[in-house]
Image (tube, coloured by chain):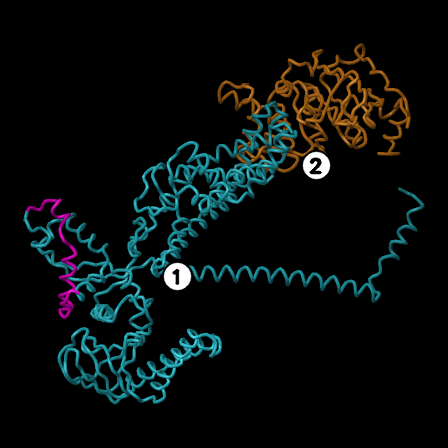
Chain colours: A orange, B cyan
Amino acid sequence: MNETANPPATPETSEGPRAKITARNVNVHYGDKHALKDVSVDVPEKGVMAFIGPSGCGKSTFLRCINRMNDTIPICRVTGDLRMDGRDIYEPGLDPVLLRARVGMVFQKPNPFPKSIYENVAYGPRLHGLARDRTELDEIVLGALKKASLFDEVKDRLKDSGTSLSGGQQQRLCIARAIAVRPEVILMDEPCSALDPIATAKIEELIDELRSNFTIVIVTHSMQQAARVSQRTAFFHLGKLIEDGVTDQIFMNPRQELTRNYITGRFG
Amino acid sequence: MTDPALPPVMNRAAAGVDFDSAEARARLKKRYRAEARFKALGLLAVLVTAAFLGFLLVDILRKGIPSFFEYRATLQITFDPAVVDPKGTRDVADLRGADYQALVRAALQAQFPEATDRRARRALDSMISSGAVDDLRKAVLADPGIIGQTRVMPLLLASDADLFLRQRETLITRLKGSGPLQVQGEGSNITLRNGGAAFRVALAGTKSFLAERRRALLAELATLPPAGGNASVDAKRNELEQAANAIQARITDANAPETLTDREPSLLVSIGGGILKITEIGPNDAKATTLVAPRPGSLITDWSVLTLRVPETNRRVNDAVSAWLETLAQRGMTEKAFNARFFTNGDSREPELAGIRGALIGSALTLLVTLLLCVPIGVAAAIYLEEFAPKNRFTDLLEVNINNLAAVPSIVFGLLGLAVFLNAFNLPRSAPLVGGLVLALLVLPTIIIASRAALKAVPPSIKEAALGIGASHQQAVFHHVLPLAMPGIMTGTIIGMAHALGETAPLLMIGMVAFIVDIPGAITEAATVLPVQIFLWSDLPELAFQSRTAGAIIVLLGFLLVMNAAAVILRRMFERRW
């Protein structure tokens, strides 16, 4: 289609907050398939950045590069330069497990552990030794539940199974589970695609509350959602980053024809 | 969305599907027929399977349940100090060595004083099992105070006597005599006279038995080649024809008296607490000899004729012993009781003493070794292969071979065990240790495959969730995937163990097929297992062992049922839904 070269990642260091994650020429191959082509983008600290694009455009692939979840796929190969706080995420000495403690993730389908609500949230802090005793652990768990605005709904049944909650509550439980580890970045892979509109609204509200403390990257199919929750948006198409910038600008006045066509619903 | 090309496409589709034409109706009918046919075939398959299973169960239960019961004679035993403790020392060694058989014989002779000669005494001895003699010894050793006393003791009957009381030796029919019976003479020369029907019916029974034998002779004759060929065949034909003709002469007149030999069904007359054996029978009178002396008296109204269908020569219990057993039963001195020995004894050459305890303990020890070996190894192998092993040619090969191993005939594992564990490692023969090792090899593929399936069934989202919080791969597997896969793994393990419990062939190869009387106490002692015990017993000629075989099968099936039920219950209990 439009063979425009990737626009150089717009340096916003002067006008916006500093970049938490910087990607330069990131390529991903699944075996023979070239899934992500020369992606360069900056994710600013403390804020919400949305990745949009049609199915199979590579936005989820890129998201999973950030916490190295792609490592679990044996045929996946990542090249290029991907840094968080200036440190190479793929540097040989870096332990991906520790990275994932700093970069939490919320998945498309709510996936609470089939354990109690309390245990779901307590698992991460226990694993990383964030609490020295039971009181501290209680504090962390209850704090995370409160931050995920789930506490009021579940305070009387913390011993109940996490799977007994409704879909929206389960997803907020997963967010609570992610933030209990006190990550710096939270990656959300289409967190509302399995939820009804009311549950979606609650999650969006929650994302808006969390952005003052966390750097949030959200992949979404819904352009309205991207417009509602994010400050910056990046548009992917066929493995390429077509355009990224301030959300209002992307939606009101996109620089690329492809972006305009996607946003106005010409294809997708 | 507003594509003008759409409406014609829809029209074409609408025109293509018609539901009303004859063709369409025929198609529908054909579909219904196919569905009905499939349903009927499925039902048929289920019914046939159920019928076979039902037949098997009924047959085994019918044959096996009698083995859980035993017949005993309850006799007054006098613990005569002269026999039990002739020296009067109450010394344990003396008490143990005493002749308890003499006590049993004395008690029987008190019942049947006419059994005086050596042969009769031996026949008396043969009624009671040697186990009963051991029981008396145990009773005295447990409480020497009973020496000098007289007690009613239950004495286990020997297996032949036991089978006779179960009517397994011969069918016994009872003809109630009507009208008074005149008894004249005594000893071996008694004449009976009666105008009722009992003798006539008994005589007719004997004649019909002879007619049957004649038919058998004629049938045999028909299978021989025609006369005039071979001299020996001609001799045989001649012999058969003569025998058939002799019988024909006996049965033409229905009222002609018959002289009974040990080749015809025995007729016993039960009168006045005694039993007479008929030697010659006519329609209204009979000659008889005394087996158990009746109370004196010449005119008796309460009597009956017993027909022992199998001729004496084909029976292991002769007429005298039959009469004694019948008398004991009439005097209320036999009892049927639960056969605890079947569960507390090891194997024995005497059917009435043989039990399955040795085999049960052997099975338990063998399964213990199997369980301890294959659960850790199998589950660890499954976790490694499913979660950690690199996907390459080697692991592919490994996987194919594990699947193939599950299909290898079990006898091959037996050969392997023989070559490796017995010949190379010099482990003890016939031991549960080696049996357990071999069965572990046999069951490992099952457990690995079941465990891998259980691990694979855990949704990957659970593992991703754990990884996303910063759990390592191993932590994710051991904290989340493995606990969720546990019910499936346990089910696979139990089913594998049930498979091992029922396995016979590989154990034959490593010598667990020996006749072992002792209960094994350790995994290195010689032992046998339940299915091998069944195999051993099924090979024995004694009728009583057939029932033991079926009894042991019931116990084995019971254990298998319990294990499979446990697998189902575990799965239900721990199954989680997402």
Q: Nearer the viewer, residue A236 or B108?
A: B108
Q: Nearer the viewer, residue B294 or A40?
A: B294
Q: Quadrant of the N terminus of chain B?
A: top right
- Badge 2 is on which residue? A194
In the rendered structure, find residue B63 and report the number of the disc placed on it: 1
Q: Quadrant of the C terminus of chain B?
A: top right
Residue B196 placed where, x, y %?
27, 88
Chain letter for the residue marked with disc 2 in the picture = A
Single out the residue that lies furthest toward the right.
B4
Q: Tell me which segment is drawn in magenta.
A: B89-118
Measured in 3D between alpha carbons, the distance from the residue under mark 1 to the one under mark 2, in whole angstroms, is 61 Å
SS for dot 1: helix
Q: Disc 1 marks which amino acid? A: Lys
Residue B361 placed where, x, y %?
35, 44
- The stretch drawn in magenta includes residue B101: yes
- The stretch drawn in magenta includes residue A244: no
Q: Residue at x 18, y 65 (%)?
A: B119
